[in-house]
Image (spheres, helix red, strand yellow):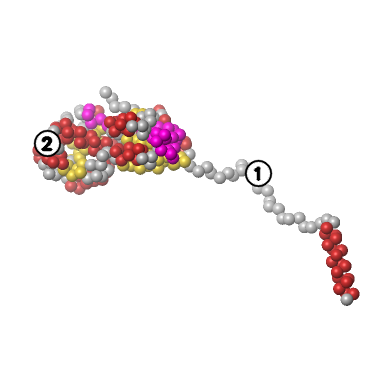
Amino acid sequence: MKRVQTWLLSLAMLLALAACGTPTAAPATTAAPAAGPTATPAAAARTLRLATTTSTADSGLLDAILPDFEQKYSAKVQVVAVGTGQALKLGQNGDADVVLVHARKQEDAFVAAGYGINRRDVMYNDFVIVGPSDDPAGVKGQAKAADAFKAIAAKQAIFDARGDGSGTSTKELSIWASTGISPTADLKQYKSLGQGMGETLTTANEQGGYALTDRGTFLAMREKLPNLALLVGGATIDENKDKALLNPYGVIPVNPAKHSGIDAELAEQFAAWITSPATQAAIGAFGKDKFGQPLFYSGVPKP
């Protein structure tokens, strides 16, 4: 019993000492980091949704110029390459922040309806007619695309059309309209593919067909198209005698008042960047080293 009382007394004294501030071991501390800049989480890159034509992608132009924009504005460009009609539809539905397309009437209608704002000229190239190297319709060297189309129809030769509502498709159908020929009704070998420019050229190469294409995509893909020759439009844009084949491109930011979620600031920055002197120079130089001519020319077509 005495031992218990002694033990309880000792415990009480220990508790009293602790309450009076008996020193305890200091908690372990983490060593201070070495002197230097404080690391901060990287800012999340913004994403710009760009709806554009297959020609800007298939030609390799976007791969060449977009890294500069992404670096300057800490942004990622999400490219959707479709026909002009589909690109404008994406903008109309609020599924793109900015469009880069080449069908002026459709572009103007898009802006007039309030879906786009402040269209600006960006660049141009031209359309040409390609076809089998043996040229069964005898169109090589024709000065006018309409005359070449008449010869193709007279021969009932294969014609591979994009058929996708693109700027190229719109131009092709306007040429047929100028001839008074309805291709779907009058040409047994007319094939409306519903495909992009690259796929259409590949099909024409395989089938021995004629096609209307922008010069830039054809030049970029020429090594993969051994059976196709450039027949109408000349070796360069300066040799193209048919001014109706000039092919201008425009950039249009989507109107943020139509849809929530549009990055209007980034879209405007893109439009200003792609029309800036530095980017215009890059566009005008693209392709020169490989093809001896640019695939696109900056600004607006020469009168």
Residue at point 26%, 45% (across, down):
195
- Specify the label residue 66 is tagged with: none
Q: In terms of depth relative to the viewer, which is nearer, 191 or 225?
A: 191
Q: Is residue 218 magenta?
A: no
> For residue 25, what is the image quadrant?
bottom right
Mark 2–mark 1 Cα distance, whole angstroms, equals 78 Å
Residue 151 position by quadrant: top left
- At horizontal 20% and vertical 48% (from top left) the residue drawn is 206
Quadrant of image for the C terminus: top left
Q: Quadrant of the N terminus?
A: bottom right
Q: Is residue 110 left or right of residue 25?
A: left
Percent of width and height locating residue 34: 65, 46
**Residue 180 shows in this picture:** yes
Q: Amino acid at mark 1?
A: Ala
User: Is 249 in the magenta?
Assistant: yes
Q: Is residue 71 left or right of residue 84?
A: right
Q: Which mark is residue 35?
A: 1
Q: Position of residue 212 (x, y in %)?
A: 21, 38
Residue furthest out toward the left = 154
Q: Position of residue 4 (x, y in %)?
A: 86, 73
- Name the secondary structure under disc 1: loop
Q: Which residues are drawn in magenta?
A: 243-271
In this rendering, is residue 21 above or below 259?
below
Q: Could you say which is closer to the camera, residue 175 or residue 131?
A: 175
Residue type pointed to by label 2: Ala
Residue 301 vs 182, above or below: the answer is above
Q: How many marks?
A: 2
Q: In terms of sequence position, does the residue under pointer 2 or pointer 1 come before the other? A: 1
Q: Residue beneath label 2, please?
A: 151
Residue 122 in sight here: no
